Amino acid sequence: MELEAFTQKFQSYSGLVLVFFIAVHLAGVILIGINPDAFEIYASNLHSSVFLPYFEIGLAITFMIHIFLTIKKVLKNRLSGNNAILKTRRNDYLGALASKVQPFTGVILASFLIIHLLQLRFPRPGDNLELTTLKNKLEDFHIFVLYSLASISLFFHLVQGIESGHRSLGILTQSNSLNIRYISRFISIFFGLSYLIITFYLRFK
Ligand code: HEM
């Protein structure tokens, strides 16, 4: 039981680190729309940073821990026939839907990430070629659909993940649950919609 509580907390903290990364990453790619030249300078500076390899290793480990612990939790819940979350969300249609599609949004995000990294990290485009590479990739309709689906999946994944993360950490109480729900939904819409808008901007502008 002790180990289980620790595992759940660890899963929530790994999710929190990833939300932080999603925010920092968004701040970088938003530059594409505001000032494309500044974006290329930002990308070149980022890639020449001596700290980047350590950051990337930390990020890769966090992604792996998060995916591993999530799969473990889903399998455990399935085996024990646990549907408690769905019951408490009887009148919360968005929450119930987000929790139902959680395994699919996770798989879509993980697949997107593999393709995304193969496009922009392995190998990395040369200096000042980041934006052209992204635009060229998004001309392929399948890639455009994948990026759009990933943005929508990110929205649903965050709706479910942020709330259940608070529950696992023991922060969710009856008095603050609605506030946490509203704030987490605002964050989810903000991130999901922002990535979706950037995808459309890159494809059609
Ligand atoms: C419209 C959506 C997106 C665009 C335009 C975009 C753009 C980029 C660009 C230009 C890079 C290479 C430069 C850099 O490292 O900043 C990159 C790297 C990366 N992106 Fe995205 N991204 C998008 C969505 C996402 C999402 C939703 C995730 C996570 C689920 C993600 C995860 C990553 C990761 C892990 C890297 C590699 C960072 C590194 O180690 O250098 N991206 N992305």
Image: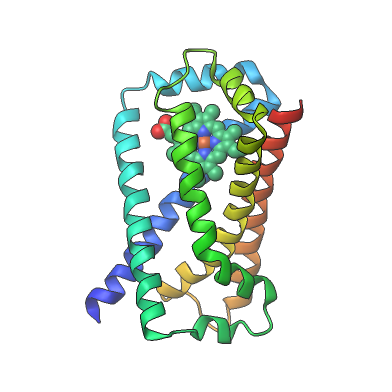
Q: Is residue 14 above or below residue 167?
A: above
Frontmost residue, 8 versus 202: 202
Quarter of the rendering occupied by the C terminus: top right
**In the image, residue 120 lies at what x, y percent?**
48, 27
Mark yes or no: residue 135 visible. yes
Specify whether 170 is left or right of 154. Answer: left
Numbered circles on residues, count: 0
Q: Residue at x 37, y 85 (%)?
A: 80
Q: Is residue 143 above or below residue 101?
A: above
Horizontal and vertical percent position of residue 203 = 71, 30
Spot the residue most to the top. 127
Residue 121, image x and y in percent?
42, 28
Quadrant into which the N terminus falls = bottom left
Please state which of residues 40 and 204 is positioned toward the viewer in this rendering.
204
Left or right: 139 as drawn, with respect to 22: right
Q: Residue at x 50, y 76 (%)?
A: 172
Q: How is the image coloured?
A: rainbow
Q: Of 56 and 173, which appears nearest the observer?
A: 56
Q: Is residue 101 above or below residue 56?
A: below
Hey, which quadrant is residue 196 in on the image? top right
Image height check: is 176 above or below 106?
Answer: below
Q: Is residue 169 visible?
A: no
Q: Residue at x 61, y 70 (%)?
A: 181
Left or right: 49 as drawn, with respect to 153: left
